[in-house]
Image (tube, rainbow, N blue to C red):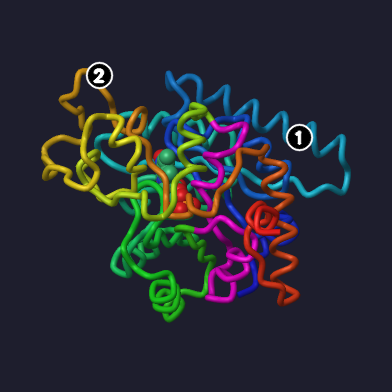
Amino acid sequence: MPLPSYLEGRLSLPLIGAPLFIVSNPDLVIEQCKAGIMGAFPALNARPPEMLDQWIGRIKSELDAHAKAHPGAIVAPFAVNQIVHRSNERLEHDVDVCVKHEVPFIISSLQAPTAIERQIHSYGGRIYHDVTTIRHAKKALDEGADGLILVCAGAGGHAGTMSPFALVAEVRQFFDGPIILSGAMATGGQILAAQAMGADLAYFGTRFIASKEANASDRYKQMVVESQAADIVYTSLFSGVKGNYLAHSIAEAGLDPANLPEADKSKMDFRSRGSVERRTWRDIWSAGQSSGMIADVPSTTEIVERLRREYESAKQGLWAQSEPFLASAA
Ligand SMILES: Cc1cc2nc3c(=O)[nH]c(=O)nc-3n(C[C@H](O)[C@H](O)[C@H](O)COP(=O)(O)O)c2cc1C
């Protein structure tokens, strides 16, 4: 599908750097946008809430300055992720800040975007909503979403279970707007594969955890590099909703990743009973099945340049492994 006119010429690669709780920060988003892909972060990462105004102000001014210093360069727009749920006490505040700054894209998660739709559309902002099923996709469109992010099997965070082939094809039967495909991708060839399947843009999260700019500990980044798809555990134990986590971080928290206890649905924030108190997201780390394709921790600029080369090779029919794996096989 052709990109919507408001995105034409605004991206140098059809990719969004997905919002990552705790991990995404202004440094990462700024480098993603300078490299020509859309960068995104969860509003909740800016703490206390007053920081959100500063974060967005800084992102806008650094991107403006970069665009002025590099006329002709493609500087991508950025997005802020809003968790639309009654438990999010900041939602009203955070949306007001986004409206003040006229944030170009809002990525809404959990409930359909009804609560924020009017405000975001009032200044021409666009809403892309996260879904894992057809039922939620239809509801989000009915309630004002401009695009759909299809979160499929193997994604980092709260992943779905559907095959991307099935979900994209079914959504395309009733929606011809922007589809962004999420889940278990980390190479340039896979961005092209997402487009061949019927999506407009790809959405990479785990790839950017293992980047220099990400707000993640060296141990977390290294664990992504060392893990394979088989080291990713899909469980609702840690947040009450099914998500993907690194088995080694679960083991380091004192639990057996192969024999996890049943989830206590009344608790959204799991604390293990080990001697060290470990909290989900901070100590039990999320990542997707693309971990098995990630071999290093380069800068964001380097990651995007590499993805662009891999994407161009794949377009010429040269299906490529991720470059670092090619190098190690040579
Ligand atoms: C550590 C981590 C934190 C995440 N936090 C959020 C979040 O706060 N909001 C959200 O909409 N998605 C979140 N996600 C999901 C991502 O935005 C995205 O859908 C996913 O990472 C894509 O799959 P991939 O990791 O296989 O590339 C998170 C994913 C990870 C790995």
Identity, as a three-letter code, of the amino acid under mark 2: Val
Q: Magenta stretch containing residue 188, yes or no?
A: yes
Residue occupied by mark 2:
276
Looking at the image, residue 321 lies above or below residue 208: below
| Callout 1 secondary element | helix
Give the farthest residue toward the front.
330
Label 1 beta carbon within 8 A of ligand 1: no
User: Magenta segment, which residues?
Assistant: 185-214
Q: Which mark identifies residue 248? A: none
Looking at the image, residue 239 lies above or below residue 177: above
Image side of residue 274 versus residue 163, left or right: left
List x then y, in percent, for residue 172: 46, 77
Q: Which residue sits at x=58%, y=76%? A: 196
Q: Magenta stretch containing residue 151, yes or no?
A: no
Regarding residue 317, the answer to whether it shows in the image is yes
Image side of residue 10 versus residue 256, left or right: right
Image side of residue 55 versus residue 133, left or right: right
Regarding residue 82, the answer to whether it shows in the image is no
From mark 2 to mark 1, how far is it between C-alphas?
45 Å
Q: Quadrant of the N terminus?
A: bottom right
* Label 2–label 1 contact, CB within 8 A: no
Q: Quadrant of the C terminus?
A: bottom right
Residue occupied by mark 1:
64
Foreground residue among 128 and 189: 189
Q: Which residue sits at x=51%, y=40%? A: 80
Foreground residue among 201 and 242: 242
Foreground residue among 16 and 101: 16
Looking at the image, residue 165 lies above or below residue 279: below
Q: Nearer the viewer, mark 2 or mark 1?
A: 2
List x then y, in percent, for residue 109: 37, 48
Identity, as a three-letter code, of the amino acid under mark 1: Asp
* Structural crowding at the residue carrying mark 2, measured as other residues with C-alpha within 10 Å and reported as few (<14), some (14–19) or many (≥20): few
